[in-house]
Image (cartoon, rainbow, N blue to C red):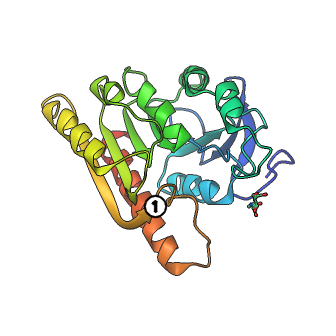
Amino acid sequence: MTSLNATSGVGSVSNIGGLKAYVAGPSLVGLATIILISDVYGYKKPNLRTVADKVAAAGYLAVVPDFFYGDPVINITKPNFDFEAWKKLHNTDKGAEDAKKVIAALKAKGVSSIGVAGFCWGGKVAVKLASGNDIKATVLLHPSWLVTDDIQDVNIPTAILAAEKDGGLTPQQLIKYEEILSKKRNKFDSFVKIYPGTAHGWTLKYQTDDKVAVKKAEEAHKDMLNWFIKHVTK
Ligand SMILES: *[C@@H]1O[C@H](CO)[C@@H](O)[C@H](O)[C@H]1NC(C)=O
């Protein structure tokens, strides 16, 4: 662990493509890599690092960039916090541009294949990357602000892991997205799953002493990892 690594995890923080990033895993060269794109709460959150460490334990290099340049959301419900202004500053188009810089830097270092997992805010960034050919597969975990066009543009193996209760990702939307993706199954694999008894953000926003919540999050982490094992060759 380096001094830059202010919170938890077995890895350390370094600079990749101009962004600070939490990195866990054996070595950089030639290794398949999974980039984890955080929710609005940023790359230091202990539960996100736990997911990254699981990815590393499965034999991937796990990279969690700081897309907010040290300015994550601290408390979204605090009265004087202007979330709209924050979203404008840290918009998902900028996130996708930054992610492409990270991907280019990893490839320049010899990383052979890359998968991307995106959580909430990061899900919207990840789906933008899924329209290109820079990465091998993506997993969208309770993604925010998805629209039909995002799914129409998807071009690579994509899994959507959705909460049962999510005002931003309704059952009607999911049915539509699954239908669009299933029509492309002759070109690439896809997977849509709704997790009973869960709400938006459940894969990261659980108390570690809440056994039921941990179990529900772990089920999604396992499905995410299986998707990468299937589609991002080590
Ligand atoms: C966020 O701010 C609200 C309103 O000030 C407060 O009630 C709540 O406890 C805060 N949450 C955290 C996690 O600090």
70 or 8: which is nearer to us? 70
Closer to the camera in the image, 36 or 33: 36
Left or right of 30, for residue 79: right
| Disc 1 residue lies near ligand 1 with CB under 8 A | no
| Residue at x 75%, y 49% (from the top left corner) | 74
Examine the image and state in which quarter residue 48 appears.
bottom right
Say which residue appears at 60% left-offset and 20% top-offset: 101
Whole-percent x, y for residue 124 in the image: 48, 34
**Does residue 33 show up?**
no
Q: Quadrant of residue 70?
A: top right
For the point 36% across and 27% down, which residue is it? 150
Quadrant location, the C terminus: top left
Residue 49 appears in view: yes
Residue 221, placed above or below residue 105: below
Ligand 1 resides in the quarter of the picture at bottom right
Quadrant of the rendered structure where residue 62 is? top right
Q: Foreground residue, 33 or 117?
A: 117
Q: Secondary structure at mark 1?
A: strand
Where 199 sits versus 34, above or below?
Answer: below
Numbered marks: total: 1
Residue 173 horizontal/vertical position (percent): 29, 42
173 or 67: nearer the eye?
173
Residue under label 1: 199
